Each structure stands twice: as C-alpha cells, then as structure tokens.
Image (cartoon, rainbow, N blue to C red):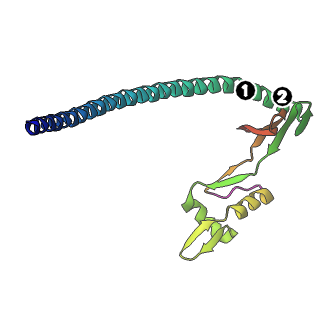
Amino acid sequence: MDEPRIDFIAELLRESEAADTVHAAEMNSLRADQMLSAVAVLEAQMADVNDLVDKEMKLLEEYRSNELARVDKKRSWLVFNLEGYARSTGEKTMRLPHGILKLRKGRDKVAVTAMEEFLKKAQALGFLRAIPESYTPDTQAVLAHIKRTGEVPPGVEFIPAETKFSYTTNGDSNGERQRDGEQTES
C-alpha cells in the first residue's frame, strides 16, 4: 500500500512544481510589463524636461537679444556724441582718463564707372595693366594721376577718403577694448 501512496505524493509534488514554474513565469512577465510601463513614464518625464529647457532657452535668447539691442542703442548714442566731440576739437587723437578717441583718414579711391569712355584715353595715359587677353584698370596709377594733376579721367569717379572714428576704453576686465565707430565723411 505504501507504493501507490508514494506515487501519489510524487505526482502531487511534480504537479505542484509544474504549477510553481508556470506561476513564476507569470510573475516575471507581469513584473517585466510593470517595469516597461515605468520606463515609458520616465521617458515621458525626460521629454517634459527637454521641452521645458527648450522653452526656457528660447526665453533667455529673446531676453539676451532684447537687452543687447537696448544697451547697444544707448552705446551707439554715446559713441555718436563722442565722435561729434572729437570732430569739433580738430584733434586727431585725444587721450582721456577712460580711453582714447581717434580720427584717422582712410585712403582715397577711384571707381571706373564708364569703361568704354575710360578706355579711350586710358591706354595713352598708362592706366591699363596688361593681362593676357584682357585689360583691367590700374586704379593706383589713375589715383596717382589725379593726385598729381587734379584731373579726373573720363569714365572715372574719384571717391575721397573718409575720416574714420574709433575709440578705446580703459579698465575692461580683458584689458583695453578698441571699437571702430560709424564711418562718416569729414
């Protein structure tokens, strides 16, 4: 009689073990699904953080742009007044406690505005550079001629040099800072 009873217990243990294995597999897939759900929630939170930071960065860039424009408008007004003052004194360089104001004359220039008209006299006056199969105006020779004789050859426009204003401020954390102001004719 013991033998059928042992077979019965062994079979119950086998069935119980098989049920535990199935149950363990179900618990693992349930747990995996829960973990996957948690990953989705965390990824959504990460996306929200990125969206928030992008919006904040856009606001900061707009703030920077607006503030720089406002401050630059004030700076431009002050530089305009400094340039007017420098021009009114007639001095080329003014050393001040907080920086230097400078007026420097640029170079005179010429521009050939009517090539056909220019070419009629340019060869005789030596105002052409020979480049194989083409000719280009020698603007340096034309400029030297204008300065020497005062005569502007036909087809040429004389552009007088502009006086440029610049300033240097002292005491900046990076040392001196030099800025060129607006270019205006003297």
Q: Is residue 140 above or below residue 86?
A: below
Q: Would residue 34 appear left or right of 79 to someone viewing this image?
A: left
Magenta-tinted stretch: 150-154
- Please state the horizontal and vertical placement of residue 157, each as a whole percent of the image: 65, 52
71 vs 8, nearest the viewer: 8
- Please state the horizontal and vertical placement of residue 147, each as a whole percent of the image: 78, 56
Q: Is residue 174 magenta?
A: no
Instruction: Tell me if mark 1 has few (under 14), some (14-19) or many (20+) residues whose alpha carbon lies within 10 angstroms of its own.
Output: few
Q: Amino acid at mark 1?
A: Arg
Q: Amino acid at mark 2?
A: Tyr
- Please state the horizontal and vertical placement of residue 31, each as a whole percent of the image: 30, 30
- State if disc 2 and disc 1 touch (CB < 8 Å): no
Q: Is residue 7 above or below residue 138?
A: above
Q: Residue at x 64, y 66 (%)?
A: 122
Which quadrant, please, contains the N terminus? Answer: top left
Q: Would residue 69 appear left or right of 57 to someone viewing this image?
A: right
Instruction: Tell me if mark 2 has few (under 14), some (14-19) or many (20+) residues whose alpha carbon lies within 10 angstroms of its own.
Output: few
139 vs 56, nearest the viewer: 56
Report how far apart the C-alphas of labels 1 and 2 lie in the structure.
15 Å
Which quadrant, please, contains the C terminus? Answer: top right
Instruction: Name the chief secondary structure element in magenta.
Output: loop
Check disc 1 and report its element: helix, strand or loop: helix
Q: Residue at x 64, y 22 (%)?
A: 70
Q: Is residue 86 above or below residue 164?
A: above
Q: Work out whether mark 1 precedes mark 2 in sequence or the reverse, and give the earlier one.
A: 1
Residue 17: image tag: none
19 vs 43, nearest the viewer: 19
Residue at label 1? 75
Q: Residue at x 58, y 70 (%)?
A: 135
Residue at label 2? 85
142 vs 20, nearest the viewer: 20
